[in-house]
Image (tube, rainbow, N blue to C red):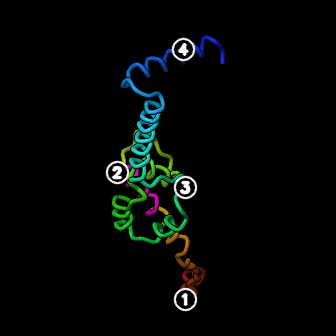
Amino acid sequence: MKTHELAKNLELIATLLKSAPNGDLTQTLRFFQKLVDDNNTKKASANTGRLAFTHVPNSVIESLQNMPLHEVETFLKTNALFVSTASIARLANQLGIEVSKRQSRDALINSITRNLEAGKMNSIIRNEPTTELTITADTTTDPAKDN
């Protein structure tokens, strides 16, 4: 730290100490420490209300893929994992859906359900047994005999 930076920091400390009640320095420092600690606990308690995650568990994705579409939509709207729009966007990214920051929460949920619906339709089409068409020649009528 340079001398001018130290001087500015000391000036800030001086104004901070002047704003505190006149008393013992140790008590004043403890008062400031308590203010900082109280502020940190308020921030921590505000963040504990939401579940923060960076990756949606694979078990959740698998269960979503096996649910009927109306249940997927209600699950995404009511589950505690997907409270924020950012958590829904993370799920969409994991499913391979491109999202934009301007999309609303409902639009993201709709995109996810449509993607899951398309995946189910694709699997139905792929797993459908193929019927082989056999072309049989009609031997009862011979065009050469008709003449």
**What separation in Å lies between label 3 and label 1 (alpha carbons)?**
68 Å
Report which residue position mark 4 lands on.
8
Secondary structure under the numbered disc 1 in the rendered image: loop
* Residue 116 is a magenta residue: yes
CA distance for labels 2 and 3: 20 Å
- x then y, percent, for residue 142: 58, 83
Going from N to C along the chain, the mark reached first, 2 or 3, is 3
Which amino acid type is shown beneath numbered disc 3?
His
Q: Distance between the residues labelled 4 and 3?
A: 44 Å
Q: Where is residue 86 in the image (x, y as percent from the top left)?
A: 44, 47
Q: Is residue 63 left or right of residue 69?
A: right
Camera-nearest label, 3 or 1: 3
Of callouts 4 and 3, the N-terminal one: 4
Residue denoted by label 1 = 140
Task: Report the residue marked by disc 3.
Answer: 55
Above or below for 106 versus 135: above
Q: Which amino acid does label 2 sit on?
A: Asp
Give the answer, above or below, for where 23 lies relative to 75.
above
In the rendered view of the protein, which quadrant contains the N terminus? top right
Highlighted magenta segment, given as a residue range = 106-117
* Amino acid found under the numbered disc labelled 1: Thr
For the stretch drawn in magenta, the main secondary structure is helix
Counting every numbered tag in the picture gives 4
Mark 4 vs mark 2, CA separation in Å = 50 Å
Q: In which quarter of the image is the C terminus?
A: bottom right
Cα distance, mark 4 to mark 1?
A: 108 Å
Q: Do the residues labelled 4 and 2 touch (CB within 8 Å)?
A: no
Q: Which residue lies furthest to the front in this view?
A: 24
Circle 4 residues within 10 Å: few <14, some 14–19, many ≥20 = few
Answer with the quarter of the image where residue 140 lies.
bottom right
